[in-house]
Image: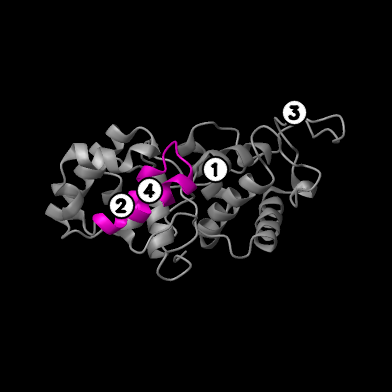
Amino acid sequence: MSVDSRIQKIVTLLATEYPDASCSLDFRSPLELLIATILSAQCTDERVNQVTKSLFRKYRSARDYASSPLTELEKDIQSTGFFRNKAKNIQACCERLDREFGGRVPEDMAVLVTLPGVGRKTANVVLGTAFGVPSGVVVDTHVARISQRLGLTHNDDPVKIEQDLMAITPQSEWIDFSHRMIKHGRRYCQAKKPNCQACPLGEVCPKLGVVMSPRQPPGKSAKPPVRQGRTRSESSASPDAPTRGKGSRGSGKGKR
C-alpha cells in the first residue's frame, strides 16, 4: 500500500472512530486556551481543568495576569507542576499581549511563537482550536508515539515529526487529525500497554517498536517509506505540552 493510500486509510479510520474528537481543555476564549495549554505541559488535562475553574474566574484578561504578584500566580497554578516557570512565562506572555496586542491573542503563527512559553505545539493548538486555522499538526507525546508505530515518521524530534505529518496529510485534516490521534493514544495506543487487538487501526499499523504480548500477533519489522514533501521552515519545539480538546465551557465544544 502506498504512503498516500495508507494515510488516507488512517485518516478515514480515525474519523470513523472519533467523529467528534476535540480539545479536552476547557476554555471560553483564545486567551483562556492559551493559558490552559501552557499549563498543560507535563500535566494532565484533567488537572489543568480543575485549576482553571477558579483561575479563569480570578484572571479575566491578559492585564490581570500581567499585573498579578508573581508569587500569587504561582500559588494559583501550583498543582499543575513546574509552576514557577509556568507562572513566569504566563505573566511575561500576557504583559506582551497587553502591551502590543491590546490583550488579544494574535492569529499569526510567526508572532505566537515569539511569545514567552509558546512554541509551535501551543501555537498550533490555539490557532486550530480557538481560530479554526490549520497552521500545522499538534505533536504531543501521543501523536509522536502513534506516528512512529504507524511508520509515518522515523524521527523523534517533535518539529521533524510535524514536518513528516504535514508532508503526507492533507492540510484540511490537520486540526481533526491531531485531536483524533491524541484521543486514539488515550483509548488504544497507550505507551506501555497498547490494546492492539481491539485497535481500529490494526489493519494498517505495522506496530513498529511495540513489544507484543504472547497473545498478540507480531508486527512487521520493516519500516514503510515516508514521502517527504516541502514544508515551510519550523520553529524550534517548545517545552509546552499538548492540548486536547473538549471545547469551551460556554459553548460545549470548541472551534476546531
Disc assigned to residue 211: 3
- Quarter residue 196 falls in: top right
Q: Is residue 180 left or right of residue 233?
A: right
Which element type, helix, strand or loop, lies under badge 1? Answer: helix
Name the residue type under label 1: Asp
- Of tags 3 and 2, the one toward the viewer is 2
Tell me, yes or no, whether the two marked residues, 2 and 4, touch with CB atoms within 8 Å.
yes
| Residue designated by label 2 | 55
Whole-percent x, y for residue 204 in the image: 76, 47
| Number of other residues with Cα within 10 Å of mark 4, as a class: few under 14, some 14 to 19, many 20 or more | some
Q: Could you tell me what secondary structure mostly forms the magenta stretch?
A: helix
Q: Is residue 108 left or right of residue 187?
A: left
Front-most of 243 and 60? 60
Whole-percent x, y for residue 45 in the image: 47, 47
In primary-sequence order, the first of circles 3 and 2 is 2
Which element type, helix, strand or loop, lies under badge 2? Answer: helix
Name the residue type under label 2: Leu
| Residue designated by label 4 | 51
The magenta region covers 34-58
Name the residue type under label 4: Val
Name the residue type under label 3: Val
**CA distance for labels 3 and 1:** 24 Å
Who's the residue at 32% across and 35% down the image? 83
Front-most of 171 and 25? 25
Residue 54 visible, this angle: yes
